[in-house]
Image: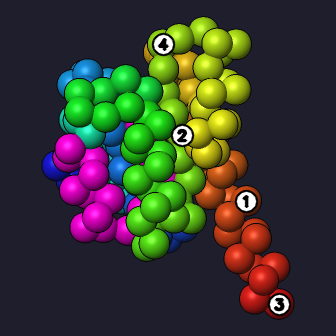
Amino acid sequence: MHYLAAGNLSTLSMHKILVVEDEKALLQACCTILANAGYGVDAAKNGMEAFDKIDESTYDAVLTDMMLPYATGAEITHKVRATPHNAAAKVVVMSAMDEEDIVYEVKHMGADGYMQKPIRAGELLSKLALLLGKEEERVKQQET
């Protein structure tokens, strides 16, 4: 499933996000929020779909649930890091678990961030802007 970007295409359309979530309403909500903010968005409802999309496309960021059919957030993160054309993608893990219980685990698995469910639009957009903005700044510094 692809969501077309709308809105501010001049700055964000270069960023492509994969959202991996098995709860249909949350998947649609995240994809709509991101597309309306100008991101290019692909959606996967389970680990198998996510693995296929990670193999087939290049992403700037992957937003994944911690517990999915056919894969965990850790397995999704490992797949992103092991796929050369996606290894630099930012990974944000979503979970309903209490932050104290999971933050260490998320960092240990190699993810770049954590978001506690329920996901709020402002928090999602801020988190991605921060992660992707830092990456753009790093690339600019390397070019000079």
The three-letter code of the residue at mark 2 reads Val
Mark nearer the N terminus (1 vs 4) = 4
Establish if 42 lies above or below 83.
Answer: above
Give how far apart the Cα atoms at labels 1 and 4 are: 26 Å
Write down the residue under mark 1.
Answer: 134
Left or right of 63: which side holds 100?
right
Mark 2–mark 1 CB contact (< 8 Å): no
Of badges 2 and 1, the one in the foreground is: 2
Indicate which disc, 2 or 1, sits on the residue closer to the N terminus. 2
Residue reaching furthest to the top: 98
Calculate the distance from the C-alpha at mark 2 to the C-alpha at mark 3: 29 Å
- The disc at residue 96 is 4
Residue 75, by quadrant, is top left
* Callout 3 amino acid: Thr
Label 4, residues with CA under 10 Å away: few <14, some 14-19, many ≥20? some
- Label 3 neighbourhood size at 10 Å, few (<14), some (14-19), many (20+)? few
Query: Which residue type carries mark 1?
Result: Lys
Q: What's the magenta region?
A: 48-64
- Mark 4 or mark 3: name the one nearer the start of the chain: 4
- Label 2: which secondary element: strand
Q: Which residue is mark 2?
A: 92
For the residues labelled 1 and 4, say whether their Cβ atoms are less than 8 Å apart: no
- Judged from the image, the secondary structure of the residue bearing numbered disc 3 is loop
Q: Residues within 10 Å of mark 2 (few under 14, many from 20)?
A: many
Observer able to see residue 34: no
Where residue 104 sits in the image (x, y, percent)? 70, 26
Is 29 one of the magenta-colored residues?
no
Inter-mark Cα distance, 4 to 2:
14 Å
Compared across the picture, whether 129 is left or right of 13 comes to right
Q: Which residue is mark 3?
A: 144
Q: Is residue 115 left or right of residue 83?
A: right
Label 1 vs 3, first from the N-terminus: 1
